[in-house]
Image (spheres, rainbow, N blue to C red):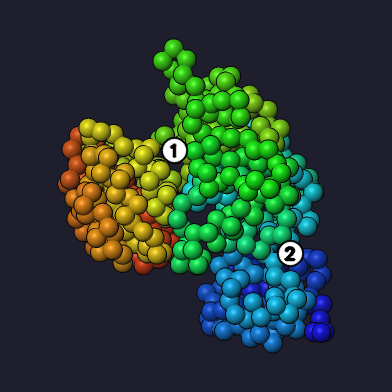
Amino acid sequence: MIATSKIKAIIGTGITGLSVARFLAAQQQAFILLDTRSSPPNLEQVKREFPTVSIECGELNPNTLLACDEIIVSPGIAVATPAIEQARAAGIPVVGDIELFVRYAKAPIVAITGSNAKSTVTTLVGEMAKTAGIHVAVGGNLGTPALELLDDAVELYVMELSSFQLETVTKLNAKVATILNISADHLDRYENMRAYILAKLRVYFGAETIVVNRNDLLTHPPLAAGVKPIYFGGRADFGGFGLIQRDGVEWLAKNLTPLMAASELKIRGRHNVDNALAALALGDAAAIPMDAMLATLKTFSGLRHRCEFVAEKNAVEFYNDSKGTNIGATLAAISGLARDPHQLIVILGGEGKGQDFTELTPALRAINSRVVLIGRDAPVIEQAISSATPTVHADSMVDAVNKAFALANAGDAVLLSPACASFDMFKNYEDRGEKFCSAVRELCAS
């Protein structure tokens, strides 16, 4: 039997790891910090904030972990790392910041995950709560780390959760939880799709109410879950939120009761209709008043880098969907902005994360499309989609924007939705999106 020292190990010194360290320090709990990188970029900040705390960098030392009584893993660190697995096998609990958050949070939690649209729906539900005058805290995988949200004055937590965060959750016990959608992602980390889906399904553990996508069976919980779901998306019925037609007008509806015309939504694209329905279902289950939710839907214009309208030149519109870092997100953006008979010119490419890009071909073939390719995996993508649409290559974002505009005619749209991670060419997806917007503005000024 291993003797424990009543000290916690925090693995990862990034934003999440720092939030955990600050939280434990405030709780007067002893801890050490570890990072798998030999020179973490924020190491000096860590040393300044925690000058007396032991810090180990580089390959994880199993003996260090075995001397601790709990290991708190940042989302970027795979729990399958051998040293962590060895500690877990020895009976040492391995958790994440969300598990700690659940231990201390006193207000109900709205938990939101999915391959795509998490940030949009999380922000939208948060805005609905604010409109209703509810003291709400919004964060998690989006914006503020979970532990920095803790406050006894909060009346409702709205949390975006990634599959990485959910891996270390035992029982979330959310007031309402959802998986918005499932598509292939992070297959460079997960052994297969089944492992990825199982991580997502952990969001339902202990939930009072669950909200599932009527049109995506992968979001439905196992039959043994024992909680009756509320559905969103597609045609409305008596099981939740969907769409109905009245005198040629499309309406968002609860059961079969019309709530507001879809044309009144400020966010653009068919995929955002589903996002609005998901937010209504979540907010309704969390007791947010309907009038506040509908008022929010009429004013909410969306988030940066998510099908964001940038500018127009010569009747060609430009949209920034740099947050489209996987195939599912890009398919949603294509579906939302397709405009036959006009062209949709899509900028694709980056780090492909092991995805099968042939999944893009039906959508590209079904519309009048052209593709501009950038980044490391451009040749892989070209091979996968060349039978569906013409492609050209670009060596920079400025080059990509200029080539896309050269392919366009009046009424067409240019969409940056790369279906890839950004780190081969950019700092992150935000940087990629900003570079796109800058290139578009430069083009429009010329």
User: Is 227 placed above or below 97 here?
Assistant: above
Q: Residue at x 31, y 67 (%)?
A: 376
Q: Residues within 10 Å of mark 1 (few under 14, many from 20)?
A: many
- The residue labelled by disc 2 is 23
Image side of residue 36 versus residue 177, left or right:
left
Pointers 2 and 1 in contact (C-beta within 8 Å) = no
Q: Amino acid at mark 1?
A: His
Q: Residue at x 23, y 49 (%)?
A: 388
Seen from the viewer's position, the closer of residues 190 and 32 is: 190
The total number of labels drawn is: 2
Residue 105 x/y as whole percent? 77, 52
Residue 404 x/y as whole percent? 22, 48
Q: Amino acid at mark 2?
A: Phe
- The residue labelled by disc 1 is 271
Mark 2 vs 1, N-terminal side: 2
User: Is 316 placed above or below 46 here?
Assistant: above
